[in-house]
Image (tube, grey):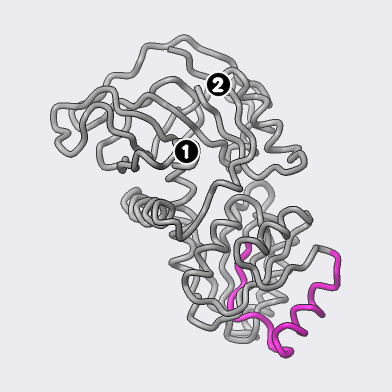
């Protein structure tokens, strides 16, 4: 089969490999779609691996083989998975790291892994009914978290981003107010919150300026939720402000596979019931041999871009 691996900075190459065979507790999945995760983009930009690095973990597809201990799936089932090495024609995953998806859900929308991240972050966000919530960064993940926060009962959701199209979409998905970076953000937040600041601020960019801004916008005894994936140089924080405000600070990332799977089940259920949507966010589709182009688009972010997917 064809599988693509990172061999140098900004360079995937194709490798002919054997189709992976499932172990006793595994399922073999024909990959129908694999999303490009922002955490992989920084790896693609700068990492020079010593050996080929097979990326791709946002996989949905069709089961083609079962391990002997797999009882709750059958060949032909459609699944969303917590996978590895997904920029390929086939993957194998543990039976507990896949969930079924309905026939009505297109594969390109069944991105269970990022849905899991967004729903788990929403669950941990401390948002209460009637809260004012600020979300900094309305990319793919920020837009999913926005929808989750709305379901939790936030009365006011304020979206902050650098792109007009991101703010426009946030408005469509439930934001009650939007602010473009550079537009006197602090003053506008105070105007919108009766000079109190936000009950909850969710930082969803993974950048130092957003972390600084989040610290400024959250109110005394508010909650600061760090969802952005902070890679690269170590970050600094204004601990004096954190102490003085008495903030509750939550790192809203999970690493336990079972917590991942719980979030995936919740996300797919909400998606299939129509309570959240992903369709306006999956904007750019590439073939397997265009994986480098997919990553380039994730860096450049052309007009209308929110999410790139690969379809073998």
**Res 12 quadrant in image:** top right
Task: Please tell me whether mark 1 sits on a helix, a strand or a loop.
Answer: strand
- Horizontally, residue 198 falls left or right of residue 255, namely right
Label whose residue precedes the other's in the sequence (2 or 1):
1
Residue drawn at the location 35% of the way across and 15% of the way down: 19
Question: Where residue 75 sits in the image (x, y, percent)?
Answer: 24, 26
- Seen in the picture, residue 144 relative to 126 is either above or below; the reply is above
Q: Is residue 57 magenta?
A: no
- Horizontally, residue 64 falls left or right of residue 15, namely left
Residue drawn at the location 63% of the way across and 78% of the way down: 242
* Residue 58 disc label: 1
Closest to the observer, 252 or 97? 97
Q: Residues within 10 Å of mark 1 (few under 14, many from 20)?
A: many
Q: Which residue appears farthest toward the front when viewing the image? A: 104
Are the residues tagged 2 and 1 within 8 Å (C-beta)? no
Question: Where residue 184 sits in the image (x, y, percent)?
Answer: 85, 73
Query: Label 2: which residue?
Result: 288
- Horizontally, residue 309 falls left or right of residue 88, namely right
Q: Is residue 183 magenta?
A: yes
- Measured Cα–Cα span from mark 2 to mark 1: 14 Å
- Horizontally, residue 283 falls left or right of residue 17, namely right
Question: Where residue 195 sits in the image (x, y, percent)?
Answer: 74, 89
Range covered by the magenta-colored residues? 182-203
Residue drawn at the location 58% of the way across and 22% of the way down: 287
Residue drawn at the location 63% of the way across and 37% of the way down: 41
**Res 5 quadrant in image:** top right
Closest to the observer, 223 or 164? 164
- Seen in the picture, residue 99 relative to 128 is either above or below; the reply is above
Question: Where residue 297 sits in the image (x, y, percent)?
Answer: 70, 34
């Amino acid at each position: 089969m064809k599988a693509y691996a990172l061999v140098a900075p900004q360079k995937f190459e194709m490798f002919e490999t054997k189709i992976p065979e499932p172990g006793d507790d595994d399922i073999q999945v024909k990959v129908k779609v694999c999303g490009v995760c922002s955490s992989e983009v920084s790896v693609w930009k700068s990492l020079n691996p010593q050996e080929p690095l097979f990326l791709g973990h946002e996989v949905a597809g069709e089961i083609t083989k079962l391990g002997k201990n797999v009882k709750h799936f059958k060949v032909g089932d459609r699944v969303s998975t917590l996978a590895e090495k997904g920029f390929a024609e086939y993957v194998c995953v543990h039976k507990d790291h896949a969930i079924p998806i309905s026939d009505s859900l297109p594969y390109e929308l069944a991105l269970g892994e990022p849905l899991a991240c967004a729903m788990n972050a929403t669950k941990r966000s401390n948002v209460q009914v009637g809260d004012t919530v600020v979300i900094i960064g309305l990319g793919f993940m920020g837009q999913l978290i926005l929808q989750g926060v709305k379901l939790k009962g936030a009365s006011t959701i304020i979206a902050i981003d650098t792109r007009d199209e991101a703010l426009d979409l946030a408005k469509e998905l439930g934001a009650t107010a939007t602010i473009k970076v550079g537009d006197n953000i602090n003053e506008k937040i105070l105007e919108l919150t009766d000079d109190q600041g936000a009950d909850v601020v969710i930082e969803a960019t993974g950048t130092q300026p957003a972390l600084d801004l989040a610290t400024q916008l959250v109110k005394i005894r508010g909650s600061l939720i760090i969802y952005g994936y902070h890679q690269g140089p170590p970050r600094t924080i204004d601990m004096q402000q954190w102490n003085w405000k008495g903030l509750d600070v939550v790192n809203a990332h999970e690493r336990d596979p079972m917590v991942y799977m719980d979030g995936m089940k919740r996300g797919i259920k909400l998606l299939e019931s129509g309570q959240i949507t992903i369709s306006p966010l999956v904007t750019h589709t590439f073939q397997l041999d265009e994986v480098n182009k997919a990553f380039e688009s994730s860096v450049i972010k052309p007009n209308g871009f929110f999410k790139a997917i690969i379809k073998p």
